[in-house]
Image (tube, rainbow, N blue to C red):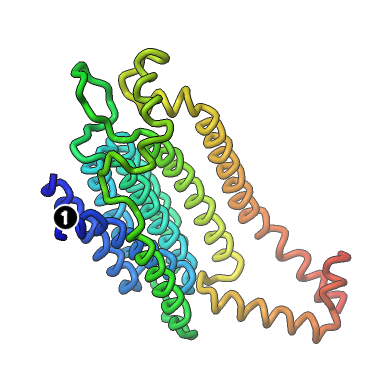
Amino acid sequence: MISELLINAFLVTIMLSIAIALIKTRTIIFTVILTSAYSLVAALMFITLDAVDVAFTEASVGAGISTILFLAAMAYLPKKEEESISSEFIPALSCIILGGILIWCSFDLPEIGQLTAPVHQHIAPEYIKGSKEDIGIPNIVTSVLASYRGYDTFGETIVVFTAGVAVLALLEKKNSAKKNKSQPKQKIRKNA
Amino acid sequence: MISSTIGIWNYWIVFCLMMIGLFLVIGRKNFLKKIVGLTIFQTSVFLLYITFGKIKGGTPPILNESINTIYSNPLPHVLILTAIVVGVATTALGLSLVLRINSEYGSIEEDDVSAQDLVDYHDDIETGKTLDLKFKK
């Protein structure tokens, strides 16, 4: 069991180093590639933590589609991040304080993998027992996603639809605004 | 001692990752970097949830024939599956907002954008056009 946790600790440390590299880099293309690598290592982590469904969703959606979105947006944006004028001391300090508080609280969390942890006592055993009898699907995640908590998935599709409509509205305005923008400004100048 | 350290090592690194994501969001002035920070924050929260669901010696929650199998907790997996898809929708929305800002201001740095806003505001005051008039229109 300890080797399993060692692999975990190793992968999560790789993720930490990728995140630190993300703070250092100022080039947008490196930022996008590092984000993609971060998602892929996260997918590996999910496999070692027994979450196979989450792993392949993260690998395809997190590392695949969001990277494509970033690359597509990058084509229209400046390629370099500018050094900011204002100091980053206060944000860094508040993050360090908050992180310290969270780590202090982590001593009260149950150790990883304990069967007696509260999260395993609530409703999960019923889902595991009922999946075969009630729904007849061997993959418990599927039966919870589509049947026991089907309303969650329905809500998710609504959220995705709303986001899609909002994206379309924003990008649509971009084209029409260019045409309309020049006319009102000229009018104002004439009046003035 | 070593095993208990490894037992909560994941939590510590996950909290560090969260703070790095938060720092990218509030500390950096580039809007694209802010969205990358949100993604980092999200993925670290996913890791935290999946870490809670792990059981030592457990298998992935797919039913098999033997009776004495311990399955890892499927409930966090389901919640995170939903969250991943919603996260991509949020990223797409954020990126389109950034594109729109870039087409309007010609920059995606927060300092530039707020400086331009300030200049516009003072121009409006000088030409006698106050904010109230703008809203009435």
Q: Which residue is mark 1?
A: B3
Secondary element at image label 1 = helix
x%, y% of residue A89? Answer: 44, 83
Q: Residue at 43% of width from left, 70% of height from top?
A: A98
Residue B49 drawn at (x, y percent): 37, 47
| Residue occupying the point 30% across, 64% down | A19
Which image quarter holds the N terminus of chain B?
Answer: bottom left
Res. A161 in view: yes
Near-viewer residue (B125 or A152): A152
Decide: is A168 above or below B72: below
Horizontal placement of A119 versus B111: left or right? left
Q: Which of the chains bears the disc numbered 1?
A: B
Displayed quadrant of residue A35: bottom left
Is B116 left or right of A53, judged from the image as shown?
right
- Establish if B41 lies above or below A40: below
In percent of the image, x 80 and y 83: which residue is there? B125
Mark 1 neighbour class, 10 Å CA radius: few under 14, some 14 to 19, many 20 or more:
few
Amino acid type, label 1? Ser
The residue at the point 21 percent across, 43 percent down is A48
Residue A137 spot, x, y in % from top left: 35, 17
